[in-house]
Image (spheres, rainbow, N blue to C red):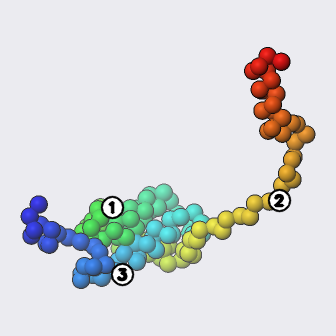
Amino acid sequence: MKINEVTEADRASIYDPDANKFQAERKLGRQITNSIEPSSGVKWPDDELWNKANMLGGMLSELPSGRARTPGEALKKAGITSKDELAEIIAKAKEARAVAMPEPQEPTDEPEDDMDGPDDDEIARQADMRARGR
């Protein structure tokens, strides 16, 4: 690899001065991706629009180093053919509530011995006695 290939390569990094070029588009991509989650509360009218939103959200979130280099290319690859489809996807993305990770549930207090059978030490003693032939 030559030095100019390293210095002139496309990068989407916080260290890249042009990293903020697609910041608004990446934010919209994250909103669209958020809206396709079941816990977002968004009801999609059909699977076809949901699939297009899924593809578009993923590609916009990864701009410019992902599967699409520009927002126009992302629209084309996602199969969005009209402004109405795009407007509907954006409207659905805006109505989604934030998806948060569920809080871990506290374990319930269980009794120490919930079975009436022998404990582990007794089982080990019985196994040793059987192994010795007693």
In-front residue for pair 79/23 = 23
Image coords of residue 125 (percent x, y): 81, 31
Instruction: Left or right? Give the position of 30 relative to 42.
Output: left
Residue wearing tag 1? 79
Tag 1, which secondary structure?
loop
Cα–Cα gap, marks 3 and 1: 21 Å
Mark 3 near mark 1, Cβ–Cβ under 8 Å?
A: no
Residue wearing tag 3? 24
Residue wearing tag 2? 109
For badge 1, the amino acid type reads: Gly
Residue 19 is tagged as none
Q: Mark 3 or 1 closer to N-term?
A: 3
Tell me what residue is drawn at x 57 percent, y 63 percent: 38
Q: Mark 1 or 2 closer to N-term?
A: 1
For badge 2, the amino acid type reads: Asp
Give neighbour class at mark 2: few <14, some 14-19, many 20+ (Cα, 10 Å): few
For badge 3, the amino acid type reads: Ala
Frontmost of labels 3 and 1 is 3
Up the image or down, 121 lies above or below 9; here it is above
Image coords of residue 48 (percent x, y): 44, 58
Tell me what residue is drawn at x 24 percent, y 83 percent: 17
Tag 2, which secondary structure?
loop
- Residue furthest right in the image: 116
Residue 78 sits in which quadrant? Answer: bottom left
Instruction: Left or right? Give the position of 128 relative to 93.
Output: right
Tell me what residue is drawn at x 50 percent, y 65 percent: 36
Can residue 116 be seen from the camera position used here? yes
In-front residue for pair 125/26 = 125
Residue 69 sits in which quadrant? Answer: bottom left
Image coords of residue 117 (percent x, y): 88, 37
* Location of the N terminus (image quadrant): bottom left
Frontmost of labels 1 and 2 is 2
